[in-house]
Image: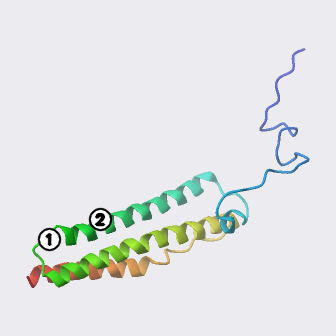
Amino acid sequence: MSERPADPATDPATDPATDPAGPPPDRRFPRSVYGTGAEPDPRFSLANERTFLAWIRTSLALLAAGVALEGLDLALQPQLRLAASLALVGLGLLCPVQAWRGWARDERAMRRGEPLAPPALGAPLAAGAVLTAVLVLLGVLLR
């Protein structure tokens, strides 16, 4: 009678959790996130990572818009154009902060089985976008 090879997924001899040496150490960064709670469904962690990357893309777009607004020398009132450009660059600097804090907070919440919180910097970013739009509008009207 031939023996089937052991399935590593179900064989206790190859399961790291039952290994006498114990499971391998978790070396993922940051420990403040991965050292908490239980592993969530990978689909949720991957969705959280996609949200992180969306914030990073938003940051790059805001930075590019701020540089372009000033660099293209558009027909806007110069002081208002500069103010709008600086506002866009400032918003572009806030987005990575939101990305990191939001990712870590949401990953910890999922690992603990807690509800997810809204973006911490959502209101300031929205207010900054409105301010920038008003500055550009005024820059067009007052040129």
Residue depicted at x 29% and y 78% = 86
Q: Is residue 13 above or below residue 87?
A: above
Q: Secondary structure at mark 1?
A: loop
Relative to 101, is 34 on the left or the right? Answer: right
Considering the image in quadrants, where does the N terminus appear?
top right
Q: Is residue 5 above or below residue 116?
A: above
Q: Amino acid at mark 1?
A: Asp
> Mark 2 and mark 1: span between their CA atoms?
14 Å
Q: Secondary structure at mark 2?
A: helix
Q: Residue furthest front?
A: 71
Mark 2 vs 1, N-terminal side = 2
Q: Return the x and y of residue 5 as percentages of the image width and height.
A: 82, 25
Q: Residues within 10 Å of mark 2 (few under 14, many from 20)?
A: some
Q: Is residue 43 above or below residue 104?
A: above
Which of the 4 quarters of the picture holds residue 130? bottom left
Q: Return the x and y of residue 81 as percentages of the image width and height.
A: 19, 78
Q: Nearer the viewer, residue 109 or 56?
A: 56
Do the residues bearing badges 2 and 1 touch, measured as CB atoms within 8 Å? no
Q: Return the x and y of residue 140 as percentages of the image width and height.
A: 11, 79
Residue 120's label in the rendered image is none
Q: Amino acid at mark 2?
A: Ala
Residue depicted at x 26% and y 69% = 67
What colour-coding does the image apply? rainbow
Residue depicted at x 68% and y 62% = 34
The residue at which mark 2 appears reads as: 64
Residue 73's label in the rendered image is 1
Residue depicted at x 71% and y 56% = 27
Q: Return the x and y of residue 133 as percentages of the image width and height.
A: 24, 78
